[in-house]
C-alpha cells in the first residue's frame, strides 16, 4: 500500500471529529424528511428509520475498518484510491466533488430563501450573490487559518443547531397522543425500499466528515470511535424526532411538506417556536456548509497530491497555517459559482447515485484489504467482527438501493461515469 508523508498537522480529537460528522449529516434534510416519510408510511414511519439506519450502520462499519488502516487525508476517496488504484480514485474524487459542490450550492440557496422569508430584500438576485460570496469566502478564510479553528467553529455550530431540535424532542413528549403512533399496517419491503432511498440522504454526510482524517490524532482508534458515536447518536436522534412529530401532529404531519418541524414547534411553543425552529434550520444549513468546506477540500488536496488530478498547485500547503489553502479556495469558489448560477437538477441526480457508488467502493475495499492481509491484521487497526458478513451485506444493500433509482437516473449516471473514464484515458495518454 502506498505510504504518504505527513504534510498536515494532526490536531483533531475524538469529539472534534464526531462533531464534524454529526454536523455534516444533520443538515437541511431532517427539517423536511419527517413529513415525506409520514406521507408514505404514516405511523409506521419508524420502520423506515430502523431499516435505513441499520443499512447506514453496516456501511459505516466498513468505513471504520478501512479508515483505521488508511489514515491520510481524503476520507472515502483515499480509501478507494489506495485500495483500487488511480483510475478508481479519479472517478471517486470527481463524483465526490461534484456531488458535494452541487449539494452545497443547493443548501446555500435554501439558506438564502429562509432568510428571504424574514427579510424580503434578500430575494434580490444581487443581494443573494453578495450573500453567497460572504458565506463561501468567510468559511474558506476560517478553514485556511487551520483545521483546529475550523473544527472549533463546526463544534460550536453543531451545538447551536442541535439544541432547538433537542428542545422539540424533550418538551414535545408531553403532547404526544399515543393513538397517533398506532400502526395501521406493517409496510412491505418494496415500500420500505422506495422511502428509504429518500430517507437515506438524511443520513448522508459521514463520508464527508471523514475527509479530515489526515489531521486526526491517533486515527486508528479515533476514526472508528467517532463513527460509532456519531452514527448511533444520529439514528437515535432521528427516531426521537419522527416519533414526537408523528405523536403530536398525527395524520396532519404529512400535509406540512415544506416545514414540518416548524409546524411542530408552532404546536408546542406557539408562534415563537415556529420562528426559532426556522432560525434553527438556517443555522443547520450553515453548519453543514461549514463542515463541507472543512472536509471536502481535503479530497481535492489528496487527489492532487496523489497525482490522480493532474493539477499540482492543488496539493499546496500554507507555510504558516499548514492547511491545503489552494484546495480550500478552489472548492469555495466553485461552491460560490454554482450557488450563484442556481438550478442543479441533473447534478442532483448524479449526486444521488454518486454517493451510493462511493459507498459501494468502500465496502468492496474492506473485502480486498482483508484478502490482501490474509488472516492477520495490525493490532492497532479496527476489524469488523463476523468475517466478511458485514461488507457483503453492505454491498447487497447498496445494490438494492441503486436498484430503486429510476431508469433515467441510472442512464445519466452511467453516461457520466463513461465520460469521466474517457477523460482519465486522455489525461493518462497526455502524461505519457
Image (cartoon, helix red, strand yellow):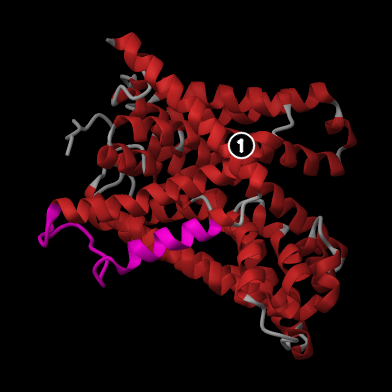
Placement of the C terminus among the 4 image quadrants:
top left
The residue positioned farthest toward the right in the image shown = 120
Q: Mark 1 points at which residue?
A: 412
* Residue 399 vertical position relative to residue 42 in the rendered view, above or below: above
* Residue 347 vertical position relative to residue 273 in the rendered view, above or below: above
Could you say where residue 169 lies in the image, as x and y percent from the top left? 66, 73
- Examine the rendering and report whether any part of residue 250 can be seen: yes
Placement of the N terminus among the 4 image quadrants:
top left
Report if residue 394 lies within the magenta region. Answer: yes
Could you say where residue 403 lies in the image, as x and y percent from the top left? 56, 56
* Residue in front for this viewpoint, 329 or 89: 89
Could you say where residue 28 lies in the image, as x and y percent from the top left? 66, 51
Residue lying at 34% horizontally and 9% vertically, measured from the top left:
430
Q: Residues within 10 Å of mark 1 (few under 14, many from 20)?
A: some
Q: In this view, does 85 lie to the left or right of 207?
A: left
Please tell me in which quadrant of the rendered image residue 394 appears: bottom left
Residue lying at 31% horizontally and 69% vertically, measured from the top left:
389
Report if residue 94 lies within the magenta region. Answer: no
Please tell me in which quadrant of the rendered image residue 43 appears: bottom right
Q: Is mark 1 on a helix, strand or loop?
A: helix
- Examine the rendering and report whether any part of residue 215 can be seen: no
Please tell me in which quadrant of the rendered image residue 51 appears: bottom right
* Residue 308 vertical position relative to residue 264 in the rendered view, above or below: above
Tell me which segment is drawn in magenta.
373-401
Residue lying at 67% horizontally and 83% vertically, measured from the top left:
186
* Residue in front for this viewpoint, 5 or 79: 79
Q: Is residue 163 left or right of residue 295?
A: right
Residue lying at 49% horizontally and 35% vertically, measured from the top left:
95
Could you say where residue 257 lies in the image, as x and y percent from the top left? 81, 59
Q: How many marks?
A: 1
Amino acid at each position: 500500500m502506498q505510504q504518504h508523508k505527513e504534510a498536515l498537522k494532526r490536531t483533531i480529537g475524538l469529539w472534534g471529529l464526531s462533531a464534524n460528522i454529526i454536523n455534516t449529516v444533520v443538515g437541511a434534510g431532517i427539517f423536511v424528511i419527517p413529513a415525506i416519510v409520514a406521507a408514505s408510511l404514516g405511523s409506521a414511519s419508524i420502520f423506515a428509520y430502523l431499516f435505513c439506519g441499520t443499512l447506514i450502520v453496516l456501511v459505516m462499519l466498513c468505513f471504520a475498518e478501512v479508515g483505521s488502516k488508511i489514515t491520510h487525508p481524503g476520507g472515502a476517496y483515499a480509501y478507494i484510491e489506495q485500495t483500487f488504484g488511480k483510475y478508481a480514485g479519479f472517478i471517486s474524487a470527481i463524483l465526490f466533488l461534484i456531488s458535494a459542490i452541487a449539494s452545497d450550492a443547493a443548501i446555500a440557496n435554501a439558506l438564502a430563501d429562509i432568510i428571504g422569508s424574514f427579510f424580503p430584500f434578500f430575494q434580490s438576485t444581487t443581494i443573494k450573490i453578495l450573500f453567497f460570496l460572504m458565506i463561501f469566502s468567510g468559511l474558506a478564510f476560517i478553514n485556511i487559518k487551520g483545521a483546529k479553528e475550523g473544527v472549533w467553529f463546526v463544534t460550536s455550530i453543531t451545538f447551536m443547531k442541535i439544541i432547538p431540535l433537542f428542545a422539540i424532542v424533550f418538551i414535545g413528549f408531553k403532547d404526544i397522543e399515543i393513538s397517533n403512533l398506532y400502526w395501521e399496517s406493517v409496510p412491505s419491503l418494496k415500500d420500505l425500499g422506495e422511502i428509504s432511498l429518500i430517507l437515506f440522504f438524511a443520513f448522508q454526510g459521514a463520508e464527508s466528515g471523514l475527509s479530515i482524517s489526515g489531521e486526526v490524532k491517533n486515527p486508528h482508534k479515533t476514526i472508528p470511535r467517532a463513527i460509532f458515536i456519531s452514527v448511533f447518536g444520529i439514528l437515535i436522534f432521528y427516531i426521537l424526532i419522527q416519533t414526537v412529530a408523528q405523536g403530536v401532529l398525527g395524520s396532519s404531519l404529512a400535509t406540512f411538506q415544506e416545514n414540518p418541524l416548524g409546524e411542530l414547534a408552532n404546536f408546542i411553543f406557539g408562534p415563537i417556536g415556529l420562528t426559532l425552529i426556522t432560525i434553527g434550520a438556517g443555522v443547520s444549513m450553515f453548519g453543514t456548509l461549514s463542515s463541507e468546506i472543512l472536509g471536502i477540500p481535503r479530497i481535492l488536496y489528496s487527489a492532487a497530491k496523489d497525482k490522480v488530478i493532474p493539477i499540482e498547485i492543488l496539493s499546496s500547503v500554507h507555510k504558516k497555517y499548514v492547511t491545503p489553502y489552494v484546495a480550500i479556495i478552489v472548492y469555495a469558489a466553485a461552491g460560490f459559482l454554482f450557488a450563484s448560477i442556481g438550478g442543479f437538477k441533473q447534478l442532483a441526480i448524479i449526486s444521488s447515485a454518486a454517493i451510493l457508488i462511493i459507498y459501494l467502493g468502500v465496502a468492496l475495499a474492506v473485502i480486498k484489504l482483508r484478502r490482501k492481509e490474509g488472516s492477520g491484521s495490525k493490532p492497532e487497526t479496527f476489524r469488523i467482527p463476523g468475517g466478511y458478513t458485514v461488507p457483503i451485506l453492505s454491498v447487497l444493500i447498496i445494490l438494492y438501493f441503486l436498484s430503486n433509482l429510476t431508469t433515467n437516473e441510472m442512464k445519466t449516471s452511467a453516461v457520466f461515469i463513461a465520460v469521466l473514464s474517457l477523460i482519465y484515458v486522455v489525461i493518462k495518454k497526455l502524461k505519457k
